[in-house]
Amino acid sequence: MFNLPYILWEVDMKGQYKRSKETIKKLSETRKRLFQEGKIMIWNKGLDKSDHRVLKNISSEGSRKTQFKSGPRPETKGKLNPYWKGGKIIHQGYVYIRVPDHPYAKRGYVQKHRLVIEKYMGRYLEPREIVHHINHNTLDNRIKNLMLLSKGEHTTLHNIKRWRKKKGDSDD
């Protein structure tokens, strides 16, 4: 998303890698520039100890430092996150769509081919129902490329194709 400078590494006396001073300076300048352009923001800028997101750092020395609560930052969820792609992701070759209210959503996402079949049939698919891509292109989610099968039917279909391939037949 952002054109960050190439990170240069130096090896210290112990043989461990660390960022070079030149790289640290370039990263700092780039972050400052992006902040000034409004492309990145610091979520905790302007907060003090009275804010509910800040915890006092309790130590025996009576430290005056503060630390922030862990968890998602309030300004970086959904559309405000710079990495937001409209609720659509591709993972392991499948398209996932964000549908947090779906009864079978996993972490708020459902596979697009399942949503297409559900819309066509007018009901939710059961987890045991399998949607097969006829042309084996998992990104092609047109209704004419999708087939609803049980687990057994889907396994049989793939076993027959493996058997034909092993025999030398080229029928698909």
Image: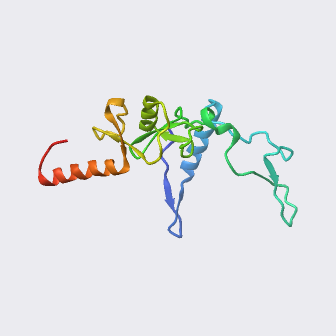
Identify the residue at horizontal 56%, vertical 43% (top origin).
Answer: 26
Percent across and percent down for residue 110 are 50, 40
Percent across and percent down for residue 166 are 16, 54
Residue 97 at least partly seen:
yes
Identify the residue at horizontal 69%, vertical 40% (top origin).
Answer: 42
Q: Nearer the viewer, residue 83 or 36?
A: 83
Which residue is outermost to the left? Answer: 168
Find residue 139 and report its image quarter: top left
Find residue 149 and report its image quarter: top left
Percent across and percent down for residue 32 are 63, 38
Image vertical order of residue 159 relative to residue 145, above or below:
below
Percent across and percent down for residue 101 are 60, 37
Q: Nearer the viewer, residue 96 or 56?
A: 96
Using residue 165 as the reference point, say whether residue 62 is left or right of it. Answer: right
Using residue 5 as the reference point, say whether residue 65 is left or right of it. Answer: right
Type of colouring = rainbow
Identify the residue at horizontal 12%, vertical 53% (top origin).
Answer: 167
Using residue 95 as the reference point, say whether residue 135 is left or right of it. Answer: left
Image vertical order of residue 113 relative to residue 9, above or below:
above
Q: Nearer the viewer, residue 17 or 82?
A: 82
Quarter of the image with the C terminus is: top left
Identify the residue at horizontal 35%, vertical 40% (top origin).
Answer: 138
